[in-house]
Amino acid sequence: MSLASRGFAAARPLLHALDAEYAHGLTIKALAALPARPAQGGGHAALAQKLFGLAFPNPLGLAPGFDKNAQVPDAMLALGFGFVEVGTVTPRPQDGNPRPRLFRLKEDEAVINRMGFNNEGAAAAARRMDARRGLAGIVGVNIGANKDSTDRVADYVDGVRWFGPRASYLTVNISSPNTPGLRGLQSRDELVRLLDRVNEARLKLPRRLPVLLKIAPDLTEAELSDIAAATGKGEVDAVIISNTTLSRPPLQSRHKGEQGGLSGKPLFALSTRQLARFHQMTGGRVPLVGVGGIADADTAWTKIVAGASLLQVYSALVYRGPGLVADILDGLARRLREHHLMNISEAVGLQSAGLAA
């Protein structure tokens, strides 16, 4: 067991006795205080791949929401993640929704949040991204719109301007359920207008910046098809499936009635089905990032064969700690050997037809 895993095992009872958001803040402070360590990457050559111009040492990334203000990306890369996505960052600082707004559903290994894009704003995150210039590791920035914005498309353009010179890639997040009206940008006409503006801003950057799009799991077949059509001609470099859900599968926790987006184990089936459907709709031409309910190597492998080239986790870390990273990577490498595959890219989408049903 690694030092980080032993530390989590010792601290977990205390952390889980505290308010979830307060405990998260303590975790960020502890990670920020750790001595600097180089990015690890996991050590499995068969898990490495190149996608949209970036060389990923492995497919497992840290989802946004954990490091909202770009405070500890390198500490997380040192745990073995293949990439880290910070944010969501909005142009101006905002407090988010009233507390309490983050709830552990321990019996379900799930989380409900209604954070509302609380963050310190683009200028603060940009300063921290500047401070890590020259360091190894892929760090993306998830960009969003301020709640009180009168022009949300302009907010995303501002995000491109702020982080285009600083990030490894950008994610356009239009799928949070906790900013009223934001998911309306997923409609076909609104999405085309947004992506046109984002790409205009991208073309003005000194280098080609990969842009990813993050969508909700709560889309109808027609809505998913519209997004597939709007993103299938190079408008984005990849699609992330998915954000949290407003639906409520059967849950056991006393917090099951809280409003907000549900993540963790109960999201796995829905998000994986949508992932597989999107892979089928696009014929595998658009790289996909699978998110939602990954808790071990088995669920990570299912996302891969459903159509994901990359993966992201967050909620499972709350329950399983940093040792989860090595467990997933070791398990994926083992499954490649069992299936006589040379590289993780060969497994992508192998079962998407069946999992889309």
Image (cartoon, rainbow, N blue to C red):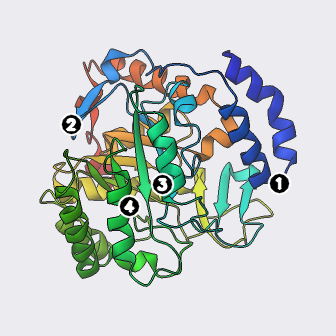
Residue picked out by circle 2: 53
How many numbered marks appear? 4
Of pointers 3 and 2, the one earlier in the residue sequence = 2
Question: What residue lies at 25% left-to-right and 53% top-to-bottom?
Answer: 279
Q: What element carries label 4?
A: helix
Which amino acid is tagged 2?
A: Gly
Is mark 1 in CB contact (under 8 Å) with mark 4? no
Question: What residue lies at 69% left-to-right and 61% top-to-bottom?
Answer: 251
Question: What residue lies at 57% left-to-right and 72% top-to-bottom?
Answer: 178
Which amino acid is tagged 4?
A: Gly
Residue density around tag 3, few if under 14, some if 14–19, many if 20 or more, within 10 Å: some
Residue picked out by circle 3: 269
Which amino acid is tagged 3?
A: Ala
Q: Which of 332 and 32 is in front in this view?
A: 32
Is mark 1 in CB contact (under 8 Å) with mark 3? no
Residue picked out by circle 4: 159
Is mark 3 in CB contact (under 8 Å) with mark 2? no
Question: What residue lies at 27% left-to-right and 32% top-to-bottom?
Answer: 347
Which amino acid is tagged 1?
A: Asp
Q: How far apart are marks 2 and 4 (CA)?
A: 21 Å
Q: Distance between the residues labelled 1 and 3?
A: 28 Å
Q: Which of 167 and 13 is in front in this view?
A: 167
Residue 149 versus residue 55 in the image, above or below: below
Query: Percent x, y for residue 263?
Result: 58, 56
Query: Percent x, y for residue 27?
Result: 72, 39
Mark 1, mark 4: which one is toward the viewer?
4
Residue density around tag 4, few if under 14, some if 14–19, many if 20 or more, within 10 Å: many
Q: Distance between the residues labelled 1 and 4?
A: 31 Å
Q: Distance between the residues labelled 3 and 2?
A: 31 Å
Residue 37 versus residue 287 in the image, above or below: above
